[in-house]
Amino acid sequence: MKSIETPLAAVTAVPFDGEPSAADLDAIERELPLILAEVDLLDAQIMVLDRPVTELDARRIRRARHRVLTARRDAANRATTALAGGAA
């Protein structure tokens, strides 16, 4: 009968030190504007959970949504530029 176990050496060939790699940190840095915009939107939405929405609250949420859309557009444009090899 053949064993279906994965060889341990193949699974643990590269030790994991628990720290993000340089590529991971670069990806986080590229996504940070979008992350911060989404946090601002979430904060604005949380503020109105237990009270009626005022005009100021609606404006704050609308602006936060606009920042999220802008950050998503910018991230998509950066990804497209990176895929195209940086040619504009």
Image: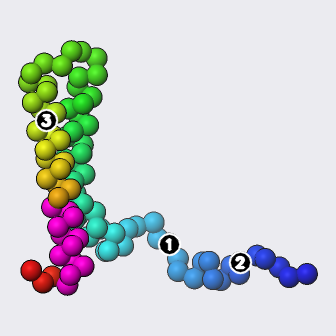
The residue most toward the right is 1
Which residue is pictured at 83% across the width and 79% down the height?
3
What residue is disc 3 on? 62
Tag 2: amino acid: Thr
What's the residue at 15%, 82% (across, down)? Answer: 86
Return the x and y of residue 32 as percentages of the image width and height.
22, 57
Q: Can you identify the residue that label 2 sits on?
A: 6
Q: Residues within 10 Å of mark 2 (few under 14, many from 20)?
A: few
Find the magenta span and give its range.
Answer: 74-85
Q: Residue 64 falls in which quadrant of the image?
A: top left
Q: Is residue 33 visible?
A: no
Q: Nearer the viewer, residue 5 or 22?
A: 5
Crowd tier of the residue under label 1, counting other residues whose Cα lies within 10 Å: few below 14, some 14–19, many 20 or above? few
Which amino acid, mark 3? Arg
Q: 7 or 85: nearer the eye?
A: 85
Q: Secondary structure beneath disc 1? A: loop
Numbered tag placed on residue 16 in the rendering: 1
